[in-house]
Image (tube, grey):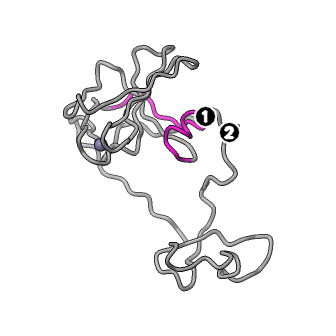
Amino acid sequence: MEVTKKSKAVALGKPATGQCLCGKVQFEIDVPARWAWHDHSPSSRRAHGAAYATYVGSWRKRFRITKGQTGITRFEDKATKTVRSFCARCGTPLTYERARSPHMVNIPRALFSGRTGRQPLYHIAIEELQEWAYTGEPLVPLKGFPGVVWQRSKKKRRSAEQDLFGLDRADI
Ligand SMILES: [Zn+2]
């Protein structure tokens, strides 16, 4: 199965805008962004509750909170000299700032609705890539479960139902 990637055209001259899950916090950056990368470090993995985080780095002076400034809370990690901010209402991670890059603000790529002018070509802490992370393996439809695709096991030929160990339709 071929997965089609979603992309939206970048509006020339217009800032790239984004928001948290609940919409209370909104922001924008001037495009193109400085850079973009995938962060596989344990701290970002936990902060996002995801296999890894993909960030867009912006110069601080080109980043603006346009709505909900008072709804932002911060977590300072003194051990790593980093500060992460979140929407206090819905918990969406908003910014990741590192003491060693004082002029940069890093924003989760997923929060932007359109293009940012940078492809995430770089990886940090790739040695931390989790064995359960999806890395683009071919997927096929799961029989009997509309909307679900899966990576067919290479080890043994067995039915999807057996592979799921009695997974009920209600679980998906
Ligand atoms: Zn929110």
- Extreme residue toward the front, this view: 89
Q: Secondary structure at mark 1?
A: loop
Q: Which residue is mark 2?
A: 128
Q: Secondary structure at mark 2?
A: helix
Residue 57 falls left or right of residue 2 = left
Residue 88 falls left or right of residue 126 = left
Q: Is residue 143 above or below residue 103?
A: below
Q: CA distance from mark 2 to mark 1?
A: 6 Å
Given residues 104 and 15, the one toward you in this image is 104
- Callout 1 amino acid: Ser
Q: Quadrant of the N terminus?
A: bottom right
Q: Earlier in the sequence, mark 2 or mark 1?
A: 1
Q: Quadrant of residue 41?
A: top right
How far across and how far down the image is residue 162, in percent? 70, 81
* Residue 86 is covered by the magenta coloring: no
Determine whether label 2 and label 1 are within 8 Å by CB: yes
Q: Which residue is mark 1?
A: 41
Magenta stretch bounds: 32-50
